[in-house]
Structure formats: structure tokens, C-alpha cells
Image (cartoon, helix red, strand yellow):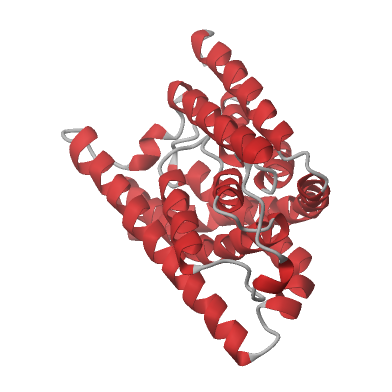
Amino acid sequence: MLLLKILLLSIVQGLAELLPVSSSAHVVVAEKLLGLDPTAPAMTLLLVMLHTGTMFAVIVYFWRQWRATYFQNAQTFWRFAGLAALATFFTGLIGGGLIEFIEHVLLRGTPHAEVEQLFGRLDLIAPALAVAGVLILIAGLAAKQPAPAAAQDAVGCTARQAGWIGAVQGLCLPFRGFSRSGATISVGMLTGVARARAEAFSFALAVVLTPPAIAREVLRLVKAEHLHQGTALASASLTSAMMPSLLGAVCSFLAGLVALKWLSRWLESGRWHWFGVYCLAAAAGVAVLHHAGF
């Protein structure tokens, strides 16, 4: 039964992760409907491993495009690396600062306070989905026209644009429902980045961000198990949690490839705003589930 639930969660994650509709929100809601605790260390590790599966889907899907742009020569690569580092710096600055504020101020006095304790709260997920939906809707309907192709370099964005994208990505870290891909691509579009370039850069940043997220959740699980069981049993528990998580990662990889084709088609055909409409509808649905007691 657990494997069936993991398979279902991996399909939800794979399809939703690479669409700008917040996979985390969808997985949390699915976990609640399946009777699982989204804030448990094993479940947050599973979520991150599902993200890992979709990260590899991103690499496979975008590799040719990245190779033709970011890796075409040393100068372009180092420009891309610098912009990715700048964006990631702002992500860490904003996201890390928010997490510290939540854990040490808002959750002060809570035993073993961690931002993950908020991940299962549908009353927070619903407004986060709504904010993401509004941002996507605005970007889809009123994004600035990008500069002519001849005026753009291979990377397709400036340091200012990369900084804004990274900062908004930081805002997404503590809040389930605030779609990372939806927010970063939308901000890129609103600051004048071409749609396809914003998509490619956003998912490149996701590849950079995923390994630290995995490390954080592995350490969190080990710490939690040490507190309750001791070192030997903690290692066994980590192993038992990793095996189904790896299966989920494989399934989310396959589902992610399907979702990426859908995303690219809608983004390039000017239907980006419809993802915003969906997020607003999803926010209303999550609010209903919250009031129903989930």
C-alpha cells in the first residue's frame, strides 16, 4: 500500500513540478488525502527525492538547449555561471533569511522548530498559490516585450534580471504553494527576458538548488531519528526511507519529461496566463479542503 501511495505521489510531483502550479502544494494535498503527514522527516525527504527525479528530467530535456547556448564557448559559459551564482546568492540571502526568521522568531519556543513544520498547513498553501497565480497571470498578459534577438547574448538575461529571478526564487523556499518555476519564469518575463530564455535559466537554477535541498532533508531525517532511536537505528531508518524515495524519484523523472513538453508548448504559444488561472482555482480548492478539516 505504501508503494502505491509513493507511486501516486511521484506522478503528481512529476506532472506538477515542471508546470508552474507548485508541485509541493499538490504533493502536500495528496499526502493529506492519503492520510500521510507532510511535515514528517521521511515525507519531506520523499518530497525532495521526487524533486531530484524531476531535476534529472530537466537535465535530459534541456541538455541540448543548454549545450547550444550556455556551453557554446568559454566566455558564454562563464557569463552564465556568474549569473547563476548571482541568482543563487540572492536565493540564499532571501530564502535563508526568511527561514531563519520563521524558525527563530515566528516559531520561537516551539520544540525543535523547523520551517518544515509549516509545510502541511493548507491555510498557508492556499494564499501562496493565489499569489503565484496572480503573478503568472500578470506576466502572461502584460509581460514586457523582450529585446530584439540581435541585442541579446546567448544567456539572454542581465545581472539585474538574474538578481530579481534569484530573489524571487528565495521567496519560494519557505512557502509551499508559491511555485518556484512559475514565479521565476514570470519575473524573468516581466523584466524583459524572452520566454524561452527565462524558462531555460529558471530550470538551470533548479538544478543548482536541488542538491543543497536534498542534503538539508537528509540531515533533518538523520537528526530526527537520532533523537528518537539512536545512531544504529537511525541509519537503518534512513536506509528504509531512502529506498521508496528512490523509486519515487524514478517515477517522477518519467512524469516530469511529459510535463516539460506541455510547459514549453504553452509558454511558447502565449498561453502562460492559463497556468495562473489554474493556480487561483487550486488556491480556492485548497481553502475548501482546509475548512473541511484537512
Q: Which of 92 and 162 is in front in this view?
A: 162
Residue lying at 20% horizontally and 42% vertically, measured from the top left: 104
Q: Whole-percent x and y of residue 198?
A: 64, 58
In this rendering, would 211 be left or right of 118? Answer: right
Q: In which quarter of the image is residue 76?
A: bottom right
Q: Nearer the viewer, residue 171 or 145?
A: 145
Q: Which residue lies furthest to the bottom in this view?
A: 74
Q: Whole-percent x and y of residue 141?
A: 67, 35
Does 68 appear above or below 26? below
Residue lying at 63% horizontally and 60% vertically, measured from the top left: 203
> Residue 4, can we see it?
yes
Does 71 appear above or below 280? below
In this rendering, would 9 be left or right of 259? Answer: left
Residue lying at 63% horizontally and 33% vertically, measured from the top left: 137
In this rendering, would 171 be left or right of 17? Answer: left
> Residue 233, can we see it?
no
Q: Whole-percent x and y of residue 227?
A: 28, 48
